[in-house]
Amino acid sequence: MEREHRPGQTASEPDGAAQAQPQPDSRLAGLENRLLEAFNELWDDFVDPTEAYYDVDGSRWGRIAGQPGHAGAVGVAFTSEAQLREIRMQCRALAVTNEFAVNGHENRISYVVGSGHAYRVTAKPGHEAGDELVREVQGVLNEFLKQNRWHKRQQEIVRRRDRDGEAFLRFFTAPDGTTRVRFVEPDEITTPPERANDPSASFGIQSDTDDVETVLGYYVDGGWVDAADIQHRKANVDANVKRGLPIFYPVRKNLRRAEKLLRNMSVVAEIQSAIALIRKHASGTRGSIEQFVAGQADASVTSQTTGRTSHFRRYAPGTILDAFAGTDYQFPAAAIDASRYVVVLQAELRAIASRLVMPEFMLTSDASNANYSSTMVAEGPAVKMFQRLQHDMIEEDLEVMWRVITSAVQQGRLP
């Protein structure tokens, strides 16, 4: 059989010399490896320019409205109904599952609403009004307060306004002049598809084309509702922003971290305290140790699924252990030191309390390091904040009462 003649090889060269020459495939593989190494090194040194816009938990920062050349509001955490819906969903979950958020909501209700408000009808100074008319108007208001369970509704208004960033009240007037109030869910206020390109109809609210603060009506489940039939109470945004922002939005991650930290502390302490002692045998085979454990057990249970046998022994209070030579007992529960993590937890809770402008004890219910006389004085930040919230609520509630009286006048119940 003739031997194949290869380029660069003479007929007199042995086969081994030909094999010693580098082959094209091997040279290509080497170049490919070097190229892959260069790419891997380049990838390791690559810095993602968007990395600065992500938090440690992987969530991306929201785009802030009011970019250069944009006529919208500045400093808003949402630019679309979808973003607002996502924010509201997160804060609603916290209001149900996070104990610190629940405590914050309840305390704000207690200090803003308290035991409720009283409404008394009087004649304006300098105007003649008979006692009979005053009693009729007072009767209309009293009936409204009773039928609508106004005190409980006030509490729900504060909860909704803090949790969702807004509360929608819709008024229904009966032919007899009575008025009923019902809540409208924020998710029901949305722009119809046919008005999606109309800036004056954004976020489900139809406003004047030249004045965003002049509201003409609302789109509720796709239907039109006049502005006179709805009161919109929004919070934490500017006047020219159509929808409100939940109060816990800036500290939602702090609330989650505080909850997880407390959970992890409790789980670790539970595991450590559940193990009463660890018995170490300096010598002995596995079989002898298992025989020793079985002999010391007060009860033994065999699993029908795995076939493993678990041995239990009850240690009564004051039990004295007698150990054989070479047996060492350790008590892991004695090494528990949860105070190291309590400091971190308190720092997170202080950050949350600062968002609410409330003393720490109002959020944690821990009054051990709080002085009531110094935190609730007339010039304290919390007192000033509650006074502001109460003043805003009184103005909005009085607007509701005037709507009730106006409806009674329109239906002929009042002159």
Image: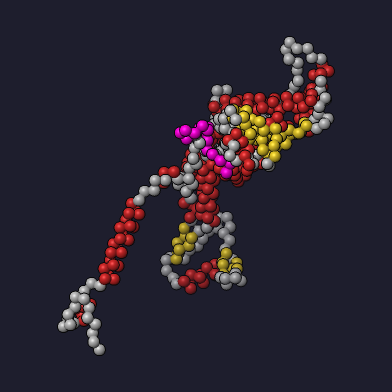
Magenta stretch, residue numbers: 67-82
Q: Which of 95 and 214 is in front in this view?
A: 214
Residue 381, image x, y percentages: 54, 27
On-image quarter of the N terminus: bottom left
- Asked whether residue 73 is drawn in magenta, I would say yes
Q: Is the magenta stretch mostly helix, strand or loop?
A: loop
Left or right of residue 50: residue 229: right
Left or right of residue 41: residue 319: right
Residue 78, image x, y percentages: 54, 39
Residue 48, image x, y percentages: 39, 48
Where 231 falls versus 276 (above or below)? above
Where 11 falls versus 271 (above or below)? below
**Residue 165 seen by the camera:** no
Which residue occupies 32% across, 56% down? 41
* Residue furthest out toward the bottom: 1
Left or right of residue 149: residue 259: left
Q: Nearer the viewer, residue 340 or 23?
A: 23
Left or right of residue 152: residue 345: left
- Asked whether residue 104 is drawn in magenta, I would say no
